[in-house]
Amino acid sequence: MHICYCYHVFYPIKGGVEENIINISQELMKRGHEVTVVTSDIPDRPKKEIIHGIKVMRTKPLFSIFKTPIMPNYKELLSTVDADIIHAHGTIPNVSDVAIFYAAKNNIPSVLTYHFDGNADSIIGSFFGEFYNRFINRKVVSKADKIIATSKSYAETSMVLNDFLGKIEIIPNGVDLNRFNPEIEVGNIREKYNLPNGNIVLYVGRFVKYKGVEYLIRAMKYVEHGTLVIAGKGKLERRLKQIVRDEKLKNVKFLGYVPDEDLPKLYRVSDVYVLPSITRGENFGISALEAMACGIPVIASDLPGVNWLVRDYCGMKVKPKDVLGLSEKINELLSNDALRSEIGKNARKNAEEYNWEDISKKVMDVYEEVLSSR
């Protein structure tokens, strides 16, 4: 079987969707299937290349809207791929819509993994997201033969998906259980990043509005026996550092970008992981899953999708933007070694259900169902 994945960016750019595509692709290629990814151009990268055995084809964007590349030649490039099934990831304007409409027009079986409702942080972006959901996104979802959602709670509360529950399969994201595990050697990770010897509260991710990092920083004002370690970068970095200065916080440390090889070690030396997201832009929480795989208890915002991953026995949930509630949960875990250990063990056990081999088998079952229905 030849599977064509469609997404607006791909390796060497890394994110949750890119990891999903590459890990499932590698599992499928082990079983003899062929995989092609059609995506946008990246400076200093060839138009066609092989990445981890995956054929990657790129087309140059004309311009971008809200960081979404607009690629007039995307459909033309897609037409050169002799695919048995087209699998788009979205929702991404000018990518998932073009791919699904192209598949429908040419009678090619199609699958759409629906990662999030269209939205953006700005007022203009929110208006555009609302417009896209109402007038385009529903059409895209209706045209796809099958929809994959990463959690039942997100699908049932989506303003788009709740009208199409009959053709939705729930298949979550996965995690590399060998790379992220409680037994990894941490080496000199504390010395390398000059980490404190006391309790560490960790956040890993981008500095964008929907991630809610501001509220986690403000919560640290009420945490006496722990240091917040923040790994990542983003457009809000200056604002977040200003909040630290304004609040005169001494227990917040910014690491900047942390390379992939150090992330499992960083999780492992941490005592608590926090996912403080504030909107549906966070539909799952891959960083939380990575922390859980390392046996670290997670505190997460009670959002659709996230609350499906972080169950009560393997983590704690708080209302989005609840600074005091967040600080209370952090203090509760940091002050109770036995509770932290118990939740951490449960977190690892829960994470073991999200191995990529099983996830890819479920995806393959969807492909076979779609093909057999033709």
Image: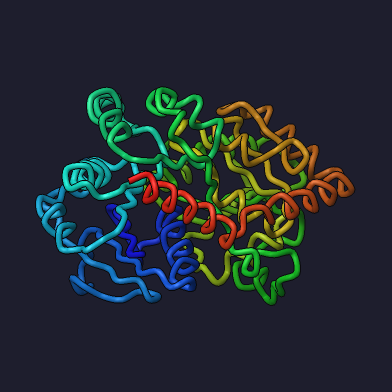
Q: Residue 212 appears at what percent x and percent y? A: 50, 36
Q: Is residue 359 above or below residue 92?
A: below
Toward the viewer: 259 or 109? Answer: 109
Position of the N terminus, as image quadrant, is bottom left
Colouring chosen for the image of the structure: rainbow
Q: Residue 369 appears at what percent x and percent y? A: 44, 48
**Residue at 71% over, 71% down:** 184
Q: Is residue 67 above or below residue 142?
A: below
**Residue at 32% over, 64% down:** 2
Q: Is residue 70 left or right of residue 352?
A: left
Q: Is residue 205 left or right of residue 288?
A: left
Regarding residue 125, the answer to whether it shows in the image is no
Q: Is residue 206 above or below residue 269?
A: above
- Quadrant for residue 123, please give it: top left
View extreme (right): residue: 338
Regarding residue 370, the answer to whether it shows in the image is yes
Q: Is residue 372 left or right of residue 256?
A: left
**Residue at 71% over, 49% down:** 350
Q: Residue 241 appears at what percent x and percent y? A: 48, 46
**Residue at 62% over, 54% down:** 354
Q: Residue 23 appears at what percent x and percent y? A: 48, 64
Count of all numbered marks drawn on residues in the image: 0
Toward the viewer: 322 or 306? Answer: 306
